Amino acid sequence: MPGLTAPASYSDEPPRHPALKINSKEPFNAEPHRSALVSSYITPVDFFYKRNHGPIPIVDDLSRYSVSITGIVNKNVQLSMADIRSLPKYDVTATLQCAGNRRTAMSKVRKVRGVGWDISALGNATWGGAKLSDVLELVGIPKLSSVTSLGGKHVEFVSVDRCKEEKGGPYKASIPLKQATDPEADVLLAYEMNGETLNRDHGYPLRVVVPGVIGARSVKWLDSINIIEEECQGFFVQKDYKMFPPSVDWDNINWSTRRPQMDFPVQSAICTLEDVDVIKEGKARIAGYAVSGGGRGIERVDISVDGGKTWVEAHRYQKSNVPYISDGPQSDKWAWVLFEATLDVPANAEIVAKAVDSAANVQPEKVEDVWNLRGILNTSWHRIKIQNSSCVGRSKM
């Protein structure tokens, strides 16, 4: 693309916050410490997880940057940033979550492949940009279309980003046309994040944001949009990010037997304590996040200090001074919910969190039940094992 170059090496990476936990350097994949996640409802850009498949592309001339819309359309269109900015701007608060969030805990059951994420491969931001439904009208595709007059049923996003999984080709993904043309789905071509211009790590100058869906579909560094008849045939749609049962391993996998993962399931995690932590016996603040896909709200977060025998409902909140109601008009339907509870924690407690969404979906109890060879969608109960400081002190005497 004119105006864009992808560096051949990792010699020109952007600066990152030193507090990030680096899971891999080349490509750069990192997450914040879990305690940083619950310090604010909106995740600061510096502490938003970084997920990459190759070197970060560079835009060296924004005036020459454009996005093409091609495929099964009557006429191909080239859109400049000025064209996109001329469309109505929307701000959408949405949580993006990597499908591999909490993979490390799953790997303790059986080996899995993928970046070793802890519980912080997600973040909540306010994205600003044009709605994809408005953009597609520019090529004659009406809102709320399931199929175009020429037979297009899917919208493919192609990145400038080159990756080894695509044998040096571009990263790409797709969503159904029905979702892309629905204004209520809030799919954006975003050029702002938290009120500021996107930075390089997060897709400058333009990225896709698909709320409620695993992060792999929110393509960064957008190069082109293709209207296609079948879903994207790229690696990350056809041979990755699919949910297989525990019985499937690398010697018997058949990728074609599963649909590409889209919505993420209901999820929660405790952020104020490590998975194995030492605290004094007595009252402790237990706080974290809960989120569900598809625009479903969080109906309840339950906390247990006895491994799941008894439960206490946690307080849920999003914005300050606005009571959170699951699926309420004042709530951000695509965003996470923060929770907190102050409880008496007995000696050697096992603290557990589980969330229930507005469709009454609940997190599965055991990670063994959702184990899969790629280590995605670990939404099992989050468990914290407590060793009380008094007991630890006596053990060392």
Image (tube, grey):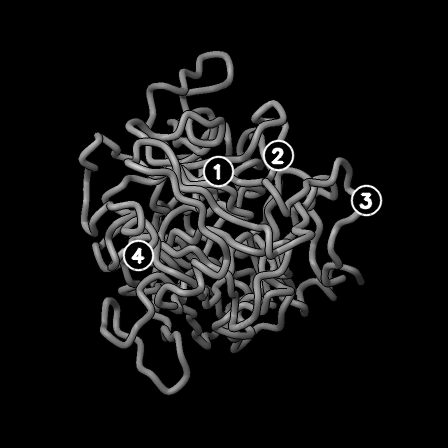
Q: Quadrant of the C terminus?
A: bottom right
Q: Which mark is residue 158?
A: 1
Q: Quadrant of the N terminus?
A: top right
Label 1, label 2: how far apart the Cα atoms are: 10 Å
Task: Give percent across and percent down for residue 204.
Answer: 59, 55
Q: Residues within 10 Å of mark 1 (few under 14, many from 20)?
A: many
Q: Amino acid at mark 2?
A: Arg
Picture residue at 62% right of the left edge, 69% below the top: 279
Earlier sequence position, callout 3 versus callout 2: 3
Using the rendered view, name the quadrant where residue 282 is placed: bottom right
Is label 3 or label 4 in front?
4
The answer to whether the residue labelled 3 contacts the one labelled 4, judged by CB atoms less than 8 Å apart, is: no
Nearer-the-camera pick, 223 or 128 = 223
Name the residue tied to disc 4.
Answer: 134
Name the residue tied to disc 2.
Answer: 162
244 shown above or below 308? above
Q: Secondary structure at mark 3?
A: loop
Label 3, label 1: how far apart the Cα atoms are: 24 Å
Label 1, label 4: how far apart the Cα atoms are: 19 Å
Earlier sequence position, callout 4 versus callout 2: 4
The answer to whether the residue labelled 3 contacts the one labelled 1, judged by CB atoms less than 8 Å apart, is: no
Picture residue at 51% right of the left edge, 46% below the top: 222
Q: Amino acid at mark 3?
A: Ser
Name the residue tied to disc 3.
Answer: 11
